[in-house]
Amino acid sequence: MSDLIQQVNSPADLKKMTVGELNEYCGCLRKYIGETVRNTGGHLASSLGAVELSVALHYVFNCPTDKILWDVGHQAYAHKIITGRRDTFSSLRKNGGISGFPKISESECDAFTMGHSSTSLSIGLGFVRARELLKQSYNVVSIIGDGAFTGGMAFEALNDIGASQARMTIVLNDNKMSISENVGAMSEYLSKLRLSKRYSRLKRTVQKGVLGIPLFGEHIYKALGKTKDGIKALLQNNKMFEQMGIKYYGPIDGHNIGNLIEIFKQTKKETCPVLIHIVTEKGKGDSAAQCDPSKFHGIQPVGSASEPAFSDVLSRFLCEEGKKNSSIVAITAAMADGTGLSSFSELCPDRYFDVGIAEQHAVTLAAGLAAGGLKPYFAVYSTFLQRGFDQILHDVCINNLGVTFLIDRAGAVGSDGITHQGIYDLSYLSIIPNMTILAPKDGNEFYKMLIWSQSFNAPLSIRYPKSYGLNSECAEIEYGKWETVVSHKSSVYILCVGGRALKAAKALGHANIINARFVKPLDTEFLNSVNVDGNVIITVEDNAVCGGFGQAVNSYLTTCGMKAKIACIGYPDEFLDDFSIEHSLESAGITESGILSAIKKLK
Ligand SMILES: Cc1ncc(C[n+]2csc(CCOP(=O)(O)OP(=O)(O)O)c2C)c(N)n1
């Protein structure tokens, strides 16, 4: 760790530095972040791009009195280091360590716990309204990336902010990238604004040239001034924000500390909403991250082993079947790489839709595509599909449309922590009529489910974690039927959802083990056959117990007249604040010993 990094213990230390020293400090921060994140894993490229921004914000504003709100929060590593977490930064994304996202319980300088995209403007406006009503006077700054700016919530908030003339600052951190290249009309609009740099240059050239004309120069320049706004509108085309009542500043070089400090000082005095459009480079200062910012958006720790991924199976299915079945269309909400859609996007670009970070829109778009006669597959992380609950219920399920949701990163997710856990999908999807839910045990079974899905013409969810261990044999998919994986002369029946639950149960070796591949509908024929006095049924799922598979089994057996004894294993009714998958599974009892002790309690 460099001396300069050691010298900054809090934002107050920054405020004593010269611009030159601040620049040097930024270089040290970059090095420290790069070295640490290569060991811990994390969101490297985004944080490197926001180093000068973080330093300038803390130079001008006063945390924790002023509220600095980092949208998503994955770019806030420099902020964390500046605000007292330098020495613990090496524990990033580990249990007992520093979260990869802002977290209220971690520091008073983290004004809000974040993780999902496009929320910072609404939260900011909430703070502003609270400030006004409580007659307080702090500043509110929301920092939002151009990727997060594609999310509907950002637009809803802008609409409200503009109309209410709230005194707040929005920093639009534009690096032209979401995780991959950014998409959409807003992104194109921002590139036009970036081009407006040419306007400033042109203005300077005109000024120099015209003022140089003897005698008439000043006259001509003044006359030109009258048409200046017209020229500006033509070249700069930045009217959108202004017409919404939000004062626009930019575009500004987001790596120029001096300029950033000046603009923040100036805009702090404004009494209306201000949007400062800064242009940054994702991965700045780190040649590998700068060359491939998408790959370095989020990285694994060096030396970490990778297991086969369910997303690779999806990729194979879409490419193979997509060639034969022209009704297949695939949708992503800015997560093409993570969900396995990249190859299909190259193979069938006209049947691939990246909608930006807009899960709600993605769901209803899928509904429209299905209503129009196509076979849509929406691949999405479990945690982000939470955004689309009403759209699933109202648009897909009431209309009973053949949309397939491919729900990746289901269950405990490990190092992304509390905001990204995928442990609620079984609960929020099970309550929706018309929805069928599947959970594959491995890649083999997933592929069979995908093939089967093509002729299934109703709402379907297939949920799975990132990876699976080994492939195994699997029975053909039959609607509403479970698969017996291990059969024993035993009164114990372990009903498992997905590979993680099966792995824990298989270690036991002396019980009937069932692959409950249909989470909804339940295999009631099977349940009736085992609902017998003296039998013990244990349900195991990598999901919250509340509203999950076990509760559905329990409730079914209760209505039939419960004869067997039952215990449900899954996550308790509290947020899963955990950075390790193994530890999460252990804490919920999704382990051999957890299942054993549940059996013992019932016997
Ligand atoms: C609702 C939601 N969907 C998806 C994500 C996953 N995600 C995290 S960061 C990111 C891209 C953000 O791009 P941008 O705001 O431009 O920030 P950058 O990383 O480019 O600095 C995405 C899609 C998320 N956090 N929240």
Image (cartoon, rainbow, N blue to C red):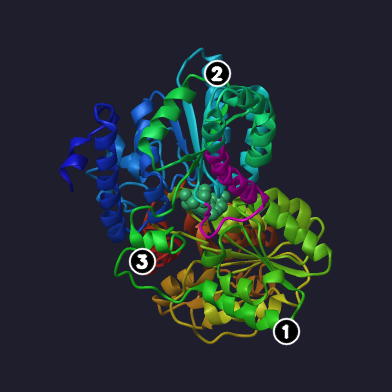
Q: Earlier in the sequence, mark 3 or mark 2?
A: 2
**Residue indicated by mark 3:** 593
Q: Amino acid at mark 1?
A: Lys
In this view, the residue in front, 482 or 281, is 281
Q: Is residue 194 magenta?
A: yes
Q: Earlier in the sequence, mark 1 or mark 2?
A: 2
Q: Which residues are magenta?
A: 176-203
**Residue indicated by mark 1:** 324
Label 3: few (<14), some (14–19) or many (≥20) C-alpha neighbours in 10 Å? some
* Left or right placement of residue 191 versus residue 368 in this view: left
Q: Secondary structure at mark 3?
A: helix
One can see residue 389 in this view: yes
Query: Picture coordinates of residue 129 (x, y %)?
Result: 57, 21
Label 1: few (<14), some (14–19) or many (≥20) C-alpha neighbours in 10 Å? few
| Ligand 1 within 8 angstroms of badge 3 C-beta | no
Find the residue positioned furthest to the left: 3
Q: Secondary structure at mark 2?
A: loop
